[in-house]
Amino acid sequence: MTFQDLNLNTPLYNALDDLGFTTPTPIQKESFNVVASGKDVVGIAQTGTGKTLAYMLPILRNLKYSRQDNPRVLVLVPTRELVVQVVSEIEKFSKYINNRVLGVYGGTNINTQKQAVAQGQDIIVATPGRLYDLAVSRVLQLKSVQKLVIDEVDVMLDLGFRHQLMNIFDILPQRRQNIMFSATMTKDVDELISDFFINPSKISIAVSGTPLENIKQERYDVPNFYTKVNLLEHLLHDKEEFSRVLIFVAYKKMADRLFNQLEELFPSESCVIHSNKTQNYRLRSIEQFREGEHRLLVATDVMARGLDIEGVSHVINFDTPDYPENYMHRIGRTGRAEKQGHSILLSTEKEQEGLERIEALMQMKIETLEIPENVQISTELIEEERPQIKERNNPTKRSDANKPGPAFHEKSEKNSKTNLGGSYKFKMAAKYKKPKTRGDKNYNRRNKK
Ligand code: AMP
């Protein structure tokens, strides 16, 4: 398949020719018709898969020339570096199209950006905070936005941008196409989709380039968190075999909880990264792991993005991801450069569905191992594992029939009269034909007539 098979136009073909692009990448092939159809779209793809072009090609093909000042396409990205990168990509593809593209981000003079916005734009690429500030200042009008793209939404939510996204959704027109790209699926991303997207089409590109034969995959069925910790302790005692271990967990709280356990079991051998840690702390942790100072690194899916660490002996999936793509990203961290890698997956009963999805994607079964006898099976449960108790019959809640009345008696008829307006004094004056006030000198004159 070449770009000629996609229904593009001459200006776009010429720009692609100039760039030397001939074949669409898998995400570009899959996205084109869906994005062009105007439906809401969720794409799972990593940076480097050509996802910018995947959403921009259909958008640029359908964007008509216009003189109106208000932007019609809004692209939100988490960092200013990405704003610059996406703007430069769009400019390359728009070489033969007469459109106006502007990138705006925080940390720079807002007035310069206001002036640029005021000149009229077709496409705005922005970080959420600065975009909102510009919209609130009313220089940037969002009422004409027809297409909203949110790129790297997993990073955006992990950095705590959810609130800003909500604010922006509030001021965008209701009728618009939502297009979202994320490298990993997290609980937060899933929630955002179900709250704001209308029946989105999902496009997912499994990570390629990871030769699965290079990775020995095994799994254990484990009942709960503490038994997982006991099993981990058992495995990690073999320091020679488990020489550099990347341990994945789904969310920050779990990362801290597991890190604390590991610190007790293997003091000064582990480090942790997630988005609530400072940039310096994260860099230091990665460095210590890379240099071999620390043997164990606990990480969330999003933070492990882009980690290129040589010689990871084992990837341990402390939990089973809901989305099989996340599993593929995780295990791709071991077994690089022709070296044999190892992956171990731990699943509770609740996580069996996730496991089925992973096996379906890979079209293979992962070998199941028995928990060794000397690993203690714990019965203690963490907060998330305890059954949720719902109060059905709350005895303190009364039914309406037994509801007590107001705590005071009704007003008597006399006291409940309402003020109908007008002045009592005026009425009396009219009735008894007396001056309204002693000072009303004109009273007699008026009444003589
Ligand atoms: P992205 O995933 O959007 O960050 O793109 C990764 C890089 O691949 C960018 O430098 C793009 O210019 C380039 N690229 C995107 N699509 C293609 C394609 N179809 N053929 C060759 N290079 C591409």
Image (cartoon, rainbow, N blue to C red):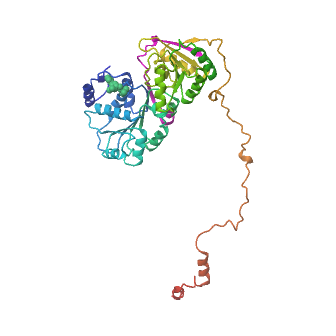
Residue 35 shown left or right of residue 357 in the figure: left
As for residue 228 lying within the magenta part, the answer is no
Q: Nearer the viewer, residue 219 or 429?
A: 219
Q: Is residue 77 visible?
A: no
**Residue 170: image x %, image y %?**
46, 43
Residue 106 shown left or right of residue 327 in the figure: left
- Quadrant for residue 32, please give it: top left
Q: Is residue 92 visible?
A: yes
- Quadrant for residue 63, please give it: top left
Residue 225 shown left or right of residue 174 in the figure: right
**Residue 323: image x %, image y %?**
50, 23
**Residue 365: image x %, image y %?**
53, 12
**Residue 217: image x %, image y %?**
51, 13
Q: Nearer the viewer, residue 439 or 244?
A: 244
- Quadrant for residue 338, please give it: top left
Q: Is residue 389 above or below residue 311?
A: below
Q: Quadrant of ligand 1?
A: top left
Count of picture labels: 0
Q: Is residue 5 above or below residue 104?
A: above
Residue 285 shown left or right of residue 96 in the figure: right
User: Which quadrant would the N terminus be assigned to in this image?
Assistant: top left
- Residue range in magenta is 192-221
Q: Nearer the viewer, residue 278 or 206?
A: 278
As for residue 199 lying within the magenta part, the answer is yes
